Each structure stands twice: as structure tokens, then as C-alpha cells.
Amino acid sequence: MRLIAENLTVERGGRTILSGLSFLAGAGEAVVLVGPNGAGKTTLLRTIAGFIRPVSGSIRLEGGQTDTTVAEQAHFIGHANAIKAHLTVRENVRFWATYLGGPREAEARVDLALQHFAISGLGEFPAAYLSAGQKRRAGLARLLVAVRPLWLLDEPTVSLDAASTKVLGAAVNAHLEGGGLVIAASHLPLGFARSREFDVAAARGIVPA
Amino acid sequence: MSDLMNLIGRDLRLAVREGGALGTALGFFLVVVAMLPLGLGPDLNLLSRIAAGILWIALLLAALLSLPRVFESDHEDGSLEVLATGGLPLELVAAGKSLAHWISTGIPLALLAPVLGILLNLDLAAYPALIATMLAGTPAVSFLGAIGAALTLKTRRGGLLLALLVLPLYIPTLIFGISAMSAATMSPGAFGPSFAILAAISLASVVVGPIAAAAALRIQLQ
């Protein structure tokens, strides 16, 4: 399975952010987007996730399901955690488990994800009382509750401590070993096996002003 | 289909847990209706003549207060983005959230209306018609309101803009709601046609609202 982005041109607010950008990510490979602030890392991730429609160019998942969009085969972890303060941690994760992965054996997947991110003990707590790092982990638990080949991670380690960063790294590495794809944007070392850096600033085809 | 039920279930659970939205809407409805007789004076004939209109307008304003919440919290906490990557089309997401809004706000407002009718000396014969028209008319309030809620999602303090966008869309519902009500008390034979049109407006908005709201949400997600 490969993710192929060809000749992407993306405009935001009348400004061209990416121009003629092409890149390729293979199965079992983590592509880490690097570049200074404003280079277009988040824009690229949001374009792959289908939120931003590119002016030209195409994104496709070769060897993926043909009847669904790339977005429906991807997990998107953005700056916000998609965690409801008024639901318990378990209710939050269970909702995403059934919504993204169907109702079958959802409970088992939820248990596994909570265990992996070491928040099983917090399952019955309302998410409002969690710390920022715990909320982030509850958000990341979404990665494990539904099987999707493509993971799009935008600054996934924000507010995570060193131990939790390792836990995330372990989840990503297991996903890569299973032939999954990961595209992450980060300024910090993520500790992923088989990762390759992709400099968005150099590849976006725009001469810096 | 199970995704849709799941989403509606989550929104209803959140509506119960958060509580504030419904409380504010019901409280506003009560206060507006309770204040009008004080302003108009104790003329019972006048009050019972204008009761239907007051109840309908107050209901629309109360529902308007709760509309921003349809998409706001999902947008703020990033849930909307994840909902968009799910298998459920954004149109159905918008439909599910509008339906949850109707169940959690529209129905309670419609059920409170007869209680408030007592304050306005509403004709006893009009009570069944009042409940029927409000239950049939409020889906339009939620589903058309969702369009405005989606359009004003990123507007800071967009409440006033929301009112400007959405209230004109409520005019047909208001006209046929009132005409069905007055037909019920004055010429019972004419109730049917007005009520049928009121229900038709609601059905049309159940179709049109989510499509327009989803288009607006796609722009907001950019």
C-alpha cells in the first residue's frame, strides 16, 4: 500500500501554501514532516485528511479500498483531542470505537486502547477532570479502536511526558510493522522506527519571501 | 445507520449532562411569555386573541438561543474533524445533530407551550392544536437552524448574525403555525390544510437543512 500525492497546489486565504508538491509514502514507513512554522505541515495533513480541497493535484491510496475516500481510511489526530468534557473517558473512546470501527466487539477494542495508553484506571472519570496529557492520551486512544491503514498525526506529542511519548512510539511502530502508513508533523523527535524526514519547506515549491 | 443512532445517542446524552442549554431555552421562553401580559395589561380578551402569536414567536426566539450549540462544541474540541473522517456522510452527521437538537430542545419547548398558554388565557379549545402545531413545526426550527449554526460556526459571538440568518427562514413556519391555530378555534374545518402545509415545511427542511448545513460545514473545516 502506498500513499501518493501528486502535484499538490493548496491555497489558503488567497495565499498559495503548497505549490506542485509531490510525495510518496510506502507501507510500513513513517514520514515525518519537518519545516519551520508556517511551512505548510498542518495544511498538508489537513489536505490529505480531505478537509482542504487542493486547487490542483491528487491524493490517492494505492492498494487501499477503492470505494472509500482517503479520509475514510485515515485517522486524523489534530491539535484538539475530540474528547467531550461531560462524557467519561470510556464513553468518549467507546463512541469513537463504534463510530469509526463499527459496533462489533467495540468494548474489547476500547479496553485494549485504554490499556495501551495507560488510562484504564481513568475510564470512569469525566474527561473534564483529566490533565492535558491525560486528555491527549484519551484522544490518541482513538488510533487503536478502529483499524485504519493511514495515520495522520499533527504534533501528536504535545503535552505528553517522556513515558507517554514512548507509548505512542510503540503504537506507531506496531502499526508500521503491520504494514500501516504514518504521516506525522512534529518539531520534536518522535522515536518512530523506519521513519523518514520530509522537508515541507523545501518541497513545497515556493521561494520564501 | 448504527453510526447515526450512535451519534444521536451521544448528543442526547451530552444534552442531558450539560443541561444548561435546555434550561436556558425553557427559562427564556417562560420569562418572555410571563413578561408580555405585564406589558400589555390585564385585558384577558386581548391576551387570548394574541396568545398563539406570542407563544410561537417566543418559542422561535428561545430555540434560537440554543442553536449555536448544535455544532459549536464539536467544532471547538475537534470532534467535527473526526466525525468528517467517519463513514457517515457529513449530511447525515448534520441531520443527526439537528434531530438530537429537536429532541432535546424542540420537543421540551413544544411541551412547555401549553403550560405557558395558561398565563395568556389561551382558549381551551386551542390547546390540542397548540401542541400539535408546535410538535409539527419545531423540526423546521432545528433543521433550518442548523444551516445558520453551521454558517456562523467560526464567527465570534455569532449569535446575532445567526438570528439575522435564521429568523427569516422561520417565517413560513410561523405563518402556517398561527393560521392552523386560529383555524382550530374559529373555523375547525380550515385546520387541516394549514396543518398539512406546516408539516410539509418541516419535512422539506428535514431534507434541505442537512444538505445546506453540510455544505457550510465543509467550508468551515477548510
Image (spheres, rainbow, N blue to C red):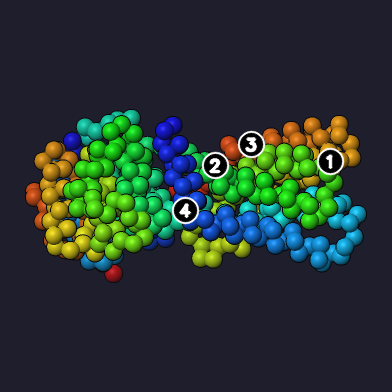
Instruction: Give me the C-alpha separation between circle 1 and circle 2.
Output: 30 Å
Measuring from the top left, give residue A113's x and y in whole percent: 22, 45
**Marks 3 and 2: in contact by CB < 8 Å?**
no
Report how far apart the C-alphas of labels 3 and 4 lie in the structure. Answer: 31 Å
Q: Write down the chain letter for disc 1.
A: B
Going from N to C along the chain, the mark reached first, 3 or 1, is 1
Earlier in the chain: of badge 2 and badge 3, it is 2
Q: Is residue A175 above or below residue A44?
A: above
Q: What's the chain of the residue with tag 4?
A: B
CA distance for labels 4 and 2: 18 Å
Q: Which residue is under mark 4?
A: B17
Q: Which amino acid does label 2 sit on?
A: Leu
C-alpha gap between disc 2 and disc 3: 14 Å
Q: Mark 1 points at which residue?
A: B125
Q: Name the residue under label 2.
A: B99
Q: Quadrant of residue B200?
A: top right
Residue B47 or A35: which is nearer the viewer? B47
Q: Do the residues labelled 3 and 4 touch (CB within 8 Å)?
A: no
C-alpha distance separating marks 4 and 1: 37 Å
Q: Determine whether the residue tagged by mark 4 lies in a helix, strand or loop.
A: helix
Asked whether, in this view, residue B112 is left or right of residue A73, the answer is: right
Q: Residues within 10 Å of mark 3 (few under 14, many from 20)?
A: some
